[in-house]
Image (cartoon, rainbow, N blue to C red):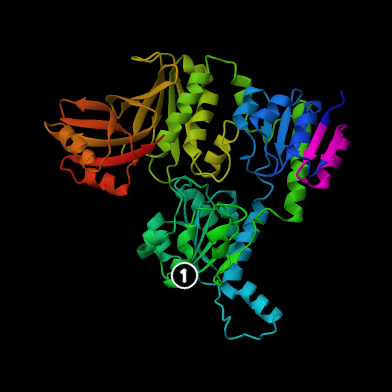
Amino acid sequence: MNYKVILLDGVDAVCGKIFKQRGFEVTEAPKMPVEELESVISDYDAMVVRSATKVTADLLEKAKKMQVVGRAGVGVDNIDLDAATRQGVLVMNTPDGNTISTAEHTCGMILALSRNIPAAVASLKEGRWDRKKYLGTEVHGKTLGIVGLGKIGSNVAQRMKSFGMNVVGFDPYTTHERAAEMGVEMMELDDLIASVDYLTVHTPLTDQTRNLISLKNADRIKPGIRLVNCARGGIYKEDDLVPLIEKGIVNGVALDVYSKEPPEGELAEMVKHPAIISTPHLGASTQEAQSKVAEQVATQIADAIEQKGFQGSLNGKSIALSTNKEVQPFLELSERFGRFLSQIAPKHINELSINFSGACAKHSEVITDSLLAGFMSDNVDEIVNLINARYFAESRGLKISETLSKESKTYSDLISVDLGPKAVYRKLSATPFGDKDYRIVSIDGFSIEIHLDGDIIIYRNIDKPGMLAATSGALAERSINIASLSLGRDLKDAHAITAFTVDTKPDATDLDHLQLIEGVHTVRYISM
């Protein structure tokens, strides 16, 4: 059969060459207008995009023959993954293609900051000889902090250690053993920020990483720190960078990514500051990286269409199971359960023990994949899904053990997870109750029903009169409304676990307010 593929967004020429070698009919359209693309897309079996083309649900609806959409790169924000899955269209990316390029760019930014290279170059080109003005500093012997020790972060660590830097890291899902193999000392985030000379981030943009450095936490930052961001715009609070420099807290900043690209308005003015080095999202922009991802995506798509392999697939298992009504509820339950667990698990957890009871046990492998996808989703700087979740977990040293039971004593199906002895909430179980109704039903032996939805506050407390009134009153004082309540009690020990679903996301001060109530402890907030 003669398959047809369309290559968009100026993907490297090697992509087309490989497709042609594999017998595909190739159309190269670097700048095809959306209207024209919509009119011809029904002719193609596959398409390759970079970041410019938006693969929307409407476009996919018109792509009647489409089997595979490939992204020559990592991010797939421009592809409607849910719509593709619904239509049985395989989506692929090339997550390893730009690792080296981004790591090298980060290292270059560190050196450029240290030696004032961009400003010195500009000065000399303008006819000045400002040797004293651009006195630099050595990186040798300095301490580099890395937030996020995935593929890119670990590559940066390896390279900068060869420059003689001391490297410390923060990554709640990298074990101490794995960090030791890299020669990286693990630290708590606040301690890291307070002690490093250089800070680089390699994480996704989440509620936990947004505004990681800002005026709000300026008192905890080591004065004179140099900041690098080649990951996601917004991890450092961009509006605060110039004030932090002018206050003498931050010595210099190097940015390759921005909350809006290209920068506009105040953001565009910010990047002009003489202490800020700015590049236009060049992390993956090397000839080698572009060639590598083009070659990878062509090979992956051809293999998939010819049924030879599905490497790089983001939704392969989802497509295979999309019509299986027996499995679907467990996949959604486990993904939500994983997200919940990730927010109460101890840092540097090195093992997850999962038990399956009932009919769900026969689908344990894919359900574990879904749970891990939820568990890792906010902690990996890439798309995490059923296909790659185990890889990301195991690459951080997380061991997975699974056991099966034929029946559950109380529920027909039960997924139970043990987070280990360091966890303040250690053993949790969850089950589906009905359509889109997923609940945690047990925590450390306490029977409790927590809907895996919304904003949840959970805490342990002494079981005595007035406790509920005290905690609900404390939330009311801070204008936080309780939407639902669940309570698990141990009458013998007079202890309880209480969970509120609230209408307003609490901040750290709100949680501290609860923690100060006598008889209340281990307060945690979970965002679903």
Q: Which residue is mark 1?
A: 245
Q: Residues within 10 Å of mark 1 (few under 14, many from 20)?
A: many
Measured from the top left, where is residue 442 in percent x and y? 32, 25
Q: Is residue 242 visible?
A: yes
24 within the magenta span? yes
Amino acid marked by disc 1: Ile
Location of residue 361 with respect to 511 vertically, above or below? above
Q: Is residue 316 visible?
A: no
Left of 297 or right of it: where is 278? left
Measured from the top left, where is residue 291 in percent x and y? 77, 49
Location of residue 366 by image quarter: top right
**In-front residue for pair 324/183:** 324
**In-front residue for pair 476/459:** 476
The residue lying at 60 percent from left, 25 percent from top is 318
Which residue is farthest left? 465
Location of residue 128 with respect to 451 vertically, above or below? below
Measured from the top left, where is residue 494 in percent x and y? 15, 30
The residue lying at 44 percent from left, 67 percent from top is 243
Q: Quadrant of the N terminus?
A: top right
State the SS at label 1.
helix
Range of magenta residues: 5-28
Left of 456 or right of it: where is 145? right
Q: Quadrant of the C terminus?
A: top left
345 within the magenta span? no
Left of 409 or right of it: where is 105? right
Location of residue 17 by image quarter: top right
Location of residue 32 by image quarter: top right
